[in-house]
Every structure is written in structure tokens, then in C-alpha cells.
Image (cartoon, coloured by chain):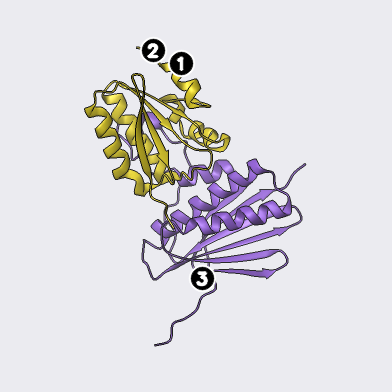
Amino acid sequence: MNQETEINLEKEGDITVFDIQRDVTAFSESVFSKAYQDADNQGTKKILLKFYEDAYINSGGIAILIQLLAKTRKNNQLICIAGLSSHFKKIFNMVGITKFAKIYNTVYEAVAVIAGES
Amino acid sequence: MKTKKIKMVQMLDDHAIEVSLPNKLGDERIAMECSASFAKIVGFLPERIEDLKTAVSEACLNAMEHGNKNHPETRVIINMNYRDHVFSVTVMDQGEGIQDFPHDIEQPDIDKKIENLQTPRGLGMFLIKRLVDQVEFNQITAEGHMVRMVLRLTG
């Protein structure tokens, strides 16, 4: 019943966008690790996680995202989030993710803000 | 060889639905979507339905992973009931519950999780508590261990 996560890396100027398709669960760990490794190998300093409104994200998936935030923090990379439904904005706020990754409504809005940040 | 047929979703009466899931991660989505459809029919707003979906999903995941300890031959039974503007959901596993169940479900410490001083997991019960109007964890019955969650239809 799980729909395996797929992440496509896209570039928006100096920002690496993780285009995250399907479920984000505990099974997503290897997909997120590979995406991060590829982005890090490219020397990225800014990462934008692009979600979709109908995404299914459970606590196992949130744990994977927390691990990703930890890696970006360790490597002094900026990370932010766009495209979440209002429900998951609330959830991410509840668990404290917003302390380490700012949430924007759209990719366009996120890119406009973080493109200028150093 | 005869195989035993198990009904996955049953309407018990006009007010109650039972879902019987195999202990397989991912299948919690069946209970989640079933609860969402039921809640929509009885008049819950989309925002509360999303809360319910996450709560049901997290309770099922806990039942599969911690209650049934990922044993594939076990099942998770979800009962949904709507009466007098109260939507209640019980999620039952075949485990024995937690002996020293914490009195208080603490807010996750995101700083410790980021610094790898605390596991990034363990968010399920916290989310359930925050998303439903009432929850009773660790209820031990003759059939197994159960979590009961309640959402009230208001307004």
C-alpha cells in the first residue's frame, strides 16, 4: 500500500529543489539520503523541499526530515519548505520543524526570498 | 487448502464501521481513508478530517510496530463509531501494552533530535494527543491493547 517516495533534484539558480513525489514515511530514508548526498556533492548551500498538497507524511517520514535538517545544519546549509497543505504546516509547526526550516506557501515565494540570502 | 477469508471493512450498524488490517506498514492508509469518508458523511469539516486521518494513521502505525511488533500474522482492528455528535475510534493490537506508560506525553525536543541526542522517532503519541479532543492510551482488554480517540462535532 506504500507509494514509494521519488525525489527529483531541480535547480533554481543556486537553490537545489527536492521535488518530493508520493508518500514520505520511514521507508523514504534511502531516497532522502541519496538525494541529499547528490545535492551535497554538487556543493549546494541552499535546499528547498517541494511538497504537494496531497502528500501523505507520517511520523516516520517526519523523522527522516528531522535527520535531513540535522545534516544541513551540520554542513551550514540553508533549508526551507514549500507546497505543504495547511494541515502539514500545522503538524510541522507542532513538532518544531519550523524552528530549523522556514515554510513558504509556494516554490515561487520561497525562491524569491532565499535567492537573495547568502 | 482452505484459506480463511477476513472481511477488511464491515459496516456493523448505522453508526459503526470496523476495519481489520493485516499488520503491514502502509495499510494504515486504508483505515485512514475509511475514517475520513465516515467523518465527511457525518459532517466534519475538512480541517478536522485531516486531524482525524493523521491520528488514525499514527495509532495504526504504533499498533503495527510496537503493539504487534511487526509480526505479519497479527492484525490491527479499528472500530469507528459516530453517535450524538461524537466520533470515536478505537485501534486495537494483539500486544500487551506498555507496563510503565508515561503519565504525560511530552512535547518533542526538536533541538535534541537535531543534535542527535534524542531519536527523531517517537512523535506518534504526541501528534495523536494534539490532534484529537480526547485520547486514552494503553487500554488493556481481553482482546488486546487498545487506544481510544474521540473527536466532537461542534458548531
Classify A102 as above or below A28: above
- Residue at the extreme left of the image, as rendered: A41
Q: Quadrant of the N terminus of chain A?
A: bottom left
- Residue at the extreme bottom of the image, as rendered: B1
| Tag 1 near tag 3, CB within 8 Å | no
| Tag 3 near tag 2, CB within 8 Å | no
Determine if marks 1 and 2 fall on one subunit.
yes
Residue under label 1: A113
Can see residue A52? yes
| Tag 1 near tag 2, CB within 8 Å | yes
Horizontal and vertical percent position of residue A28: 35, 45
Classify A97 as above or below A77: below
Residue under label 2: A117
Please state which amino acid type lies under the numbered disc 1: Val
Please state which amino acid type lies under the numbered disc 2: Glu
User: Which chain does purple denote in the image?
Assistant: B
Please state which amino acid type lies under the numbered disc 3: Glu
Which residue lies at the image location 33% right of the left edge and 36% below the top edge? A67
The residue tagged with tag 3: helix, strand or loop?
Answer: loop
Q: Which mark is residue B143?
A: 3
Q: Local crowd at mark 3 within 10 Å, few (<14), some, or many (≥20)?
A: few
Q: Colour of chain A?
A: yellow
The residue tagged with tag 2: helix, strand or loop?
Answer: loop
Foreground tag (1 vs 3): 1
